[in-house]
Image (cartoon, grey):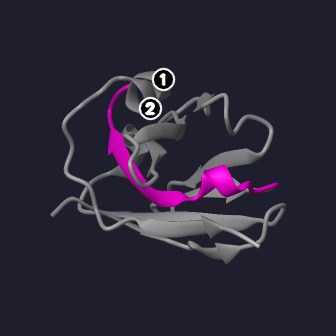
Amino acid sequence: QVQLVESGGGLVQPGGSLRLSCAASGFILDYYAIGWFRQAPGKEREGVSCISSSDGSTYYADSVKGRFTISRDNAKKTAYLQMNSLKPEDTAVYYCAAEPISPFNLCVLPRRRTWGQGTQVTVSS
């Protein structure tokens, strides 16, 4: 059974940091690009950052460039999103997804997916 489970969210003050984790099971993660998405209240879900299956190429939304870093550990079947210099506008539920396509296509192309529960990130003083 293909499953992705997000964790690591929480409440943090502006300027703070969080590290999200996405644990994969039920498939061979090595062959899949994996990425992070977020959905704020009243807004559409957007691709935040995605990383390729093999060459380490990445995609970042303009709003998070220079602040967020995506990484993956195929041996642990886990992807991470290090979020620094967090802003109130980063508040959202964060989700992960994986597909055998390029990181750009994973993050940008609209596709019908089944999403997990996500993890809530709240940036507030």
Q: Residue at x 36, y 48 (%)?
A: 97
The amino acid marked with disc number 2 is Cys
- Residue at x-position 77% and y-position 71%: 13
The residue closer to the viewer here, 17 or 91, is 91
**As displayed, is residue 88 above or below residue 53?**
below
Name the image quarter holding the C terminus. bottom right
Q: Give residue 49's position: percent from left, percent from top.
A: 56, 39
Question: Does residue 60 lie above or below 84 as drawn?
Answer: above
Q: Name the residue under label 2.
A: 107
Asked if one can make out residue 76 in the rendered structure from this viewpoint, the answer is no
Task: Say whether residue 25 is left or right of residue 64.
Answer: left
Question: From which residue to which does the magenta span run?
Answer: 85-101
Figure check: 43 above or below 103? below
Circle 1 SS class: helix
Q: In the rendered structure, which amino acid carries the disc numbered 1? A: Phe
Give the secondary structure at mark 2. Answer: helix
To which residue does mark 1 refer? 104
Mark 2 in CB contact with mark 1 (< 8 angstroms): yes
Q: Residue 81 carries which label?
A: none
- Of the 4 image quadrants, the one containing the N terminus is bottom left
Gap in Å between the C-alphas at discs 2 and 1? 5 Å
**Does 117 lie within the magenta span?**
no
Indicate the position of residue 3 as horizontal and vertical percent values.
26, 63
Assess whether residue 94 is covered by the magenta stretch: yes
Count neighbours of disc 2 (C-alpha within 10 A) and say few if under 14, some if 14 to 19, many if 20 or more.
many
Q: Residues within 10 Å of mark 1 (few under 14, many from 20)?
A: many
Q: Where is residue 9 in the image (x, y as percent from the top left)?
A: 56, 72
Report the number of discs: 2
- Residue occupying image coordinates x 57% and y 52%: 72
